[in-house]
Image (spheres, rainbow, N blue to C red):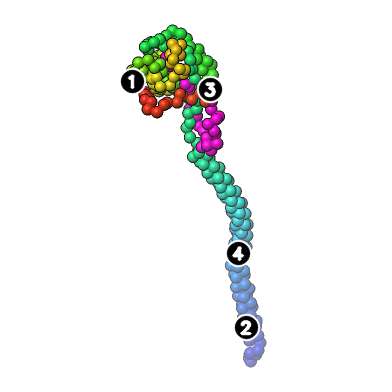
């Protein structure tokens, strides 16, 4: 029997083609199965990148806002620094000043050659202090200067010591009876060197045997204000008696 080669080869070729085609289809399916997850991951990555870009844009906006706030804070700090400089400059010009308030130059008179505080003198002092205590502001930071005086009878040295004893008597009365702060009571003696009137008569000598109480108040003032104030602003009579050349001054 004679076999036709064409008849045998054609079916074989067809079979081989089918096998090859099936292999190609299988490979394509396998590749597709592998590519689909990769494509999904790429898509997810793109979404994440987009989200990251959005977050970075938002962060950039916040940083811009923070920079604006920092700029405002710098401006405020500059204003505070300027105010601080002005305050320090004002403080540098402040100083403690003692100003005269009021005095009692008559009424606390003494007997001849005596340092005992008379009853009438105590009454005068009581009235003076009572008026001061009625003004709380007037007593705030008050400093009492108690000045003892004599007439011109006797030696100058003796009268100096007598004036000091009289000032001490009034100071002791202010501290023990009127409850004044001892640190705010200062005594001085002018002796016979600052008479109120002439010593040519008995009446004049009686007026000179006295103790004056001058009240000063401590306060804060600026150097500029102090320099612009004139001496005429304070009463002449309010100043302590002027001392002649060579006068002795005792302070305790």
For image coordinates 49% across by 20% down, the residue present is: 103
Task: Answer with mark 2 or mark 3, whichever residue precedes in sequence.
Answer: 2
Q: Give the percent coordinates (x, y) of residue 115.
A: 37, 12
Residue 3 found in image quarter: bottom right
Q: How far apart are marks 4 and 2 (CA)?
A: 45 Å
User: Do the CB atoms of the residues marked 2 and 3 lie less than 8 Å apart?
Assistant: no
- Counting residues from the start of the chain, the first of labels 1 and 2 encountered is 2
Q: Name the residue under label 3.
A: 137
What residue lies at 54% left-to-right and 45% top-to-bottom? 81
Quadrant of the snapshot with the N terminus: bottom right
Image disc number at residue 12: 2
**Of the pair 3 and 72, the residue shown nearer to us:** 72
- Secondary element at tag 2: helix
Q: Which mark is residue 42?
A: 4
Are circles 4 and 1 on residues that touch, CB within 8 Å? no
Q: What stretch is highlighted in magenta?
A: 206-235
Q: Earlier in the sequence, mark 4 or mark 2?
A: 2
For label 2, count other residues whose C-alpha is less than 10 Å away and answer few (under 14), some (14-19) or many (20+).
few
Graded by Cα atoms within 10 Å as few (under 14), some (14 to 19) or many (20 or more), the crowding at tag 3 reads few
Can residue 155 be seen in this snapshot? yes
Q: Give the spatial CA distance, label 3 vs label 1.
A: 40 Å
Q: Is residue 90 left or right of residue 28?
A: left
* In the depicted structure, whether residue 84 falls above or below residue 118: below
User: What is the number of the mark on residue 244?
Assistant: none
Q: How far apart are marks 4 and 3 (CA)?
A: 87 Å
Give left or right: position of 161 versus 75: left
Q: Disc 1 marks which residue?
A: 157
Q: Quadrant of the C terminus?
A: top left
Magenta-span inclusion, residue 60: no
Report helix, strand or loop for mark 3: helix
Looking at the rendered structure, the number of numbered marks drawn on it comes to 4
């Amino acid at each position: 029997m004679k076999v036709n080669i064409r008849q045998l080869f054609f079916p074989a070729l067809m079979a081989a083609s089918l096998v090859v085609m099936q292999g190609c289809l299988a490979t394509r399916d396998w590749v597709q199965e592998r590519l689909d997850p990769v494509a999904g991951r790429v898509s997810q990555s793109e979404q994440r990148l987009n989200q990251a870009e959005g977050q970075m844009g938002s962060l950039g906006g916040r940083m811009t806002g923070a920079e604006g706030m920092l700029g405002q804070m710098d401006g405020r700090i500059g204003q505070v620094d300027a105010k601080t400089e002005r305050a320090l400059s004002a403080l540098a010009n402040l100083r403690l000043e003692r100003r005269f308030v009021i005095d009692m130059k008559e009424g606390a008179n003494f007997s001849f050659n005596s340092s005992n505080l008379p009853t009438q003198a105590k009454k005068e002092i009581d009235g003076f202090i009572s008026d001061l205590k009625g003004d709380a502001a007037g007593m705030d930071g008050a400093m009492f200067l108690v000045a003892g005086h004599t007439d011109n009878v006797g030696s100058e040295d003796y009268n100096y010591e007598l004036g000091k004893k009289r000032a001490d008597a009034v100071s002791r009365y202010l501290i023990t009876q009127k409850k004044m702060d001892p640190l705010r009571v200062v005594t001085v003696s002018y002796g016979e060197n600052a008479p109120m009137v002439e010593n040519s008569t008995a009446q004049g000598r009686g007026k000179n045997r006295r103790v004056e109480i001058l009240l000063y108040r401590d306060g804060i003032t600026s150097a500029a204000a102090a320099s612009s104030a004139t001496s005429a602003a304070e009463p002449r009579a309010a100043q302590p008696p002027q001392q002649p050349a060579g006068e002795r001054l005792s302070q305790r």
